[in-house]
């Protein structure tokens, strides 16, 4: 049966199919002419009147040591004024008073209250005394002597 199948396959392979593939002729490539999109600004600037506001907040947390506060206000003409305070790690308080407007820009006055103190570092532990192990040299044991091999020709 294997021989018969091989003969049938050979006989059928000799006859080409009566159908031919359709001719394929793609249209020539022609890119569209370049034309940039018209320019449209993303958003137009709107000169809006200043909105008056005032706010303040503060934090005094003894656990973390966070200690600061801020207050700020703006009038109907856009003049901004404010102040913030920060407790610094060296014990001083930094106070920044600022004003901002369209004529002078941002103007800040920085001052400090208190004296800076840097306490001397003292570790919370005492290191254990150094006690090296006593020195005991190992006894000297030389390797046994073995003469090198000799060859005679």
Image (cartoon, grey):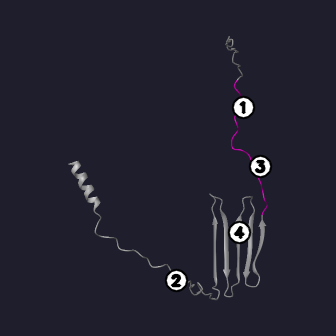
The one nearer the camera, 128 or 1, is 1
Q: Which mark is residue 120?
A: 3
Q: Nearer the viewer, mark 3 or mark 2?
A: 2
Say what secondary structure mark 1 lies in. Answer: loop
* Tag 3 and tag 1, C-beta contact below 8 Å: no
Tell me how far mark 3 sits from mark 1, CA to CA.
Answer: 25 Å
**Could you tell me residue 103's position as x and y percent?**
76, 85
Q: Which residue is mark 4?
A: 85
Q: Which residue is mark 2?
A: 32
Asked whether residue 131 is drawn in magenta, I would say yes
Q: Quadrant of residue 126?
A: top right
The answer to whether residue 142 is left or right of residue 24 is right
The answer to whether residue 57 is left or right of residue 10 is right
Tell me how far mark 2 sits from mark 4, CA to CA.
Answer: 64 Å
Question: Quick one: label 4 or label 3, which is nearer the N terminus?
Answer: 4
Q: Nearer the viewer, mark 2 or mark 1?
A: 2
Whether 109 is drawn above or below 11: the answer is below
């Amino acid at each position: 049966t294997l021989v018969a199948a091989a003969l049938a396959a050979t006989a059928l392979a000799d006859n080409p199919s009566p159908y031919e593939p359709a001719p394929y002729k793609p249209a020539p490539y022609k890119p569209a002419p370049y034309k940039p999109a018209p320019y449209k600004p993303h958003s137009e600037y709107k000169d809006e009147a200043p909105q008056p506001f005032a706010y303040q907040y503060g934090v005094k947390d003894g656990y973390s040591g966070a200690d600061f506060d801020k207050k700020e206000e703006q009038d109907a003409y856009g003049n901004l004024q404010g102040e913030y305070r920060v407790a610094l790690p060296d014990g001083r308080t930094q106070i920044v008073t600022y004003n901002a407007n369209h004529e002078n820009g941002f103007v800040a006055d920085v001052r400090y209250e208190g004296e800076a103190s840097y306490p001397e570092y003292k570790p919370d532990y005492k290191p254990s005394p150094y006690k090296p192990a006593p020195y005991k040299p190992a006894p000297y044991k030389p390797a046994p002597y073995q003469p090198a091999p000799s060859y005679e020709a």
